[in-house]
């Protein structure tokens, strides 16, 4: 008899897949197996439910759960526009959430860094759901330990390089700290979608949201790829990089941002890059009554997985005028 339902804990292999009710069953991202066995795993999905570094609206601690729930429809069909089943190409597991104690702020950085180190040492790539944007700092710290200074592609409304004192937990200063500590190679890094002001660009190439609107996707990709070349490229996607019309559920919304279609086209255009990791942060479900924000976050994550699958040489099966 064909198995049905709750493959999250019933599968024997991380590449198995069967029918689920999109509105029922145990949740994981894309219904992947919950596991902490990293043997021969390509991608490890995990959540970092932490939002005590926010400066405005909280709620991003609920982001990982919301993104997993929003992925249920994506798990139903073959990927669009690629036309293949990504879970048959890549061995993907959902590790669950890293246990972070909000009552011990002095442990936040080490807890997340150790979590990431454990996964990266097994040569797995990380797909991570925040949490507020501060969680990217310990993630980048761990990736830099493995790869050396990383190239950063940051989708954001804000630069997150305001003056840092070296110890505060602040989701608006941590990239200044990462640059000062040599974790990020700014000469190969790009910030995209910005529409707030800082006197210091820290050496990043900044493609503001208005610039992207006027100049388009291809020119943006040309700049990003020319700077990154074949360096290890880490993507940090703050959903407030999107206009609030497309991502209302976030802590610091700013008008005039990227549209969801622009973000997806940019992600899909990065398949030639040396992609080493992705975090998606600042999804705050309490400010979104229709799951708009978590749906786009899940789709961005899914498309990133698909371009990693595409890099294996799998044949695409596109239909229509893509």
Image (cartoon, helix red, strand yellow):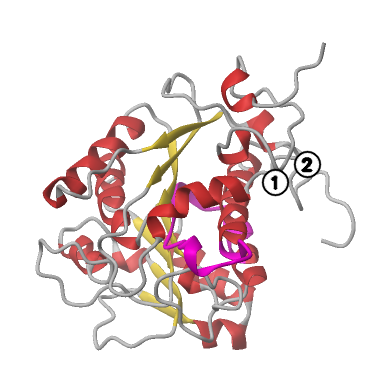
Q: Which residue is mark 1?
A: 74
Question: Which quadrant would the C terminus be assigned to in this image?
Answer: bottom right
* Drawn side of residue 161 relative to residue 2, left or right: left
Q: Nearer the viewer, residue 291 or 139?
A: 291
Segment tinted magenta in the rendering: 266-293
Q: Is residue 292 magenta?
A: yes
Q: Which residue is found at the position 27% from the left and 71% from the top?
A: 172
Q: Is residue 233 visible?
A: no
* Drawn side of residue 159 relative to residue 210, left or right: left
Give how far across and how far down residue 189 sits, in percent. Answer: 37, 66
Query: On screen, 222 above or below 31?
Result: below
Give how far across and how far down residue 33 sits, in percent. Answer: 56, 26
* Drawn side of residue 22 relative to residue 135, left or right: right
Question: Which quadrant would the N terminus be assigned to in this image?
Answer: top right
Q: Nearer the viewer, residue 9 or 129?
A: 9
Identify the element where label 1 is drawn. loop
Mark 1 burial class by Cα count in 10 Å: few <14, some 14-19, many 20+: some
Q: Which residue is found at the position 62% from the left and 39% from the top?
A: 30
Seen from this angle, which residue lies furthest top?
Answer: 1
Q: Is residue 262 visible?
A: yes
Total marks placed = 2
Identify the element where label 2 is drawn. loop
Give how far across and how far down residue 58 sits, in percent. Answer: 35, 66
Q: Which residue is found at the position 63% from the left and 80% from the top?
A: 216
Q: Is residue 127 magenta?
A: no
Give how far across and how far down residue 174 sits, in percent. Answer: 23, 64
Q: Point out which mark residue 317 bears.
A: none
Q: Which residue is mark 2?
A: 77
Query: On screen, 279 above or below 9?
Result: below
Q: Which residue is found at the position 55% from the left and 37% from the top?
A: 28
Mark 2 burial class by Cα count in 10 Å: few <14, some 14-19, many 20+: few
The residues bearing labels 1 and 2 have C-alpha atoms spaced at a distance of 6 Å
């Amino acid at each position: 008899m064909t198995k049905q339902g709750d493959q999250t804990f019933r599968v024997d292999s991380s590449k198995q897949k069967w029918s689920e009710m999109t509105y029922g069953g145990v949740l994981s991202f894309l219904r992947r197996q919950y596991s902490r066995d990293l043997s021969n795993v390509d991608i490890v999905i995990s959540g970092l439910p932490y939002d005590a570094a926010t400066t405005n609206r909280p709620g991003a601690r609920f982001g990982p759960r919301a993104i997993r729930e929003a992925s249920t429809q994506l798990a139903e069909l073959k990927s669009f526009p690629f036309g293949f089943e990504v879970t048959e190409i890549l061995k993907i597991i959902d590790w669950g959430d890293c246990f972070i104690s909000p009552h011990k702020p002095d442990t936040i950085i080490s807890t997340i860094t150790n979590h990431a180190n454990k996964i990266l040492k097994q040569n797995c790539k990380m797909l991570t759901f925040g949490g507020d944007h501060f969680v990217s700092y310990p993630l980048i710290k761990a990736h830099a330990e493995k790869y050396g200074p990383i190239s950063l592609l940051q989708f954001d409304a804000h630069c997150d390089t305001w003056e840092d004192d070296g110890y505060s937990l602040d989701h608006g200063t941590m990239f200044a700290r990462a640059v000062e500590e040599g974790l990020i190679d700014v000469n190969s890094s790009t910030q995209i979608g910005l529409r707030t002001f800082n006197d210091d660009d820290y050496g990043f190439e900044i493609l503001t949201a208005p610039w992207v609107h006027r100049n388009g996707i291809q020119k943006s990709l040309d700049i990003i790829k020319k700077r990154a070349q074949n360096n290890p490229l880490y993507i940090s996607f703050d959903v407030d990089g999107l206009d609030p019309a497309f991502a209302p559920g976030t802590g610091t919304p700013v008008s005039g941002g990227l549209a969801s279609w622009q973000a997806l086209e940019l992600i899909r255009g990065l398949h030639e890059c040396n992609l080493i990791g992705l975090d998606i942060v600042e999804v705050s479900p309490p400010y979104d009554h229709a799951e708009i924000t978590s749906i786009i976050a899940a789709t961005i994550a899914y498309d990133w997985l698909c371009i990693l699958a595409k890099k294996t040489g799998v044949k695409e099966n596109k239909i229509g005028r893509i």
